[in-house]
Image (cartoon, helix red, strand yellow):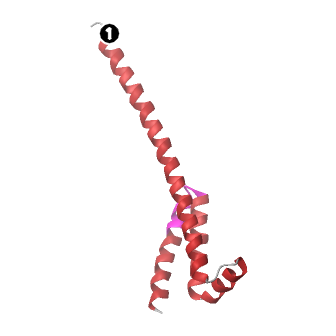
Amino acid sequence: MIAQILLSVLLLAAGLFGWQTFRRAPLIGASAMAAAAGGLYFVWIPEHATRLAAFAGIGRGVDLILYIWVAISLLLLLHLHLKLRVQMELITTLARAIALAEARQERRPG
């Protein structure tokens, strides 16, 4: 029972994060809220996770949830990597523009 309450609090926090993020990034917010709702459902009715796992050909419900968590984590890591890559390209472009602007100012007679 303690684990269910602790997990419920954590999942509610994840759902709140999704709710707050929904305006800025609807896909991320909706995904977080859906994952939190699914997590809450399986925390309080774990027998359904076991049935779903058996239907998917996986032995236990907890294994299914772990596999899904790993897949979601990898997708999030890929998303963050791509965002960081875009940020670094933008920083490089800005640094080049600033360097060229400063070089032009230094060459002006005056």
Residue at the location (54% across, 55% down)?
Answer: 24
Q: Is residue 5 magenta?
A: no
Q: Position of residue 85 (x, y in %)?
A: 48, 43
Viewer-nearest residue: 93 or 26: 93
Q: Secondary structure at mark 1?
A: loop
In the figure, is residue 1 to the left or right of 46?
left
The picture quadrant where one finds residue 28 is bottom right
Q: Residue furthest top?
A: 109
- Of all residues shown, which one is farthest toward the right? 55
Residue under the image location 50 percent in, 71 percent down: 14
Stretch of the chain drawn in magenta: 17-26
Looking at the rendered structure, the kind of residue marked 1 is: Arg
Q: Which residue does the image show at 32% across and 9% down from the upper left?
A: 108
Identify the residue under disc 1. 108
Would you call the spot at circle 1 few (<14 residues within 10 Å), some (14-19), or many (20 or more)?
few
Q: Quadrant of the C terminus?
A: top left
In the picture, residue 48 is in which quadrant?
bottom right
**Residue 58 horizontal side relative to residue 90, left or right:** right
Q: Is residue 2 above or below residue 88?
A: below
Q: Residue furthest left?
A: 110
Q: Is residue 108 left or right of residue 86?
A: left
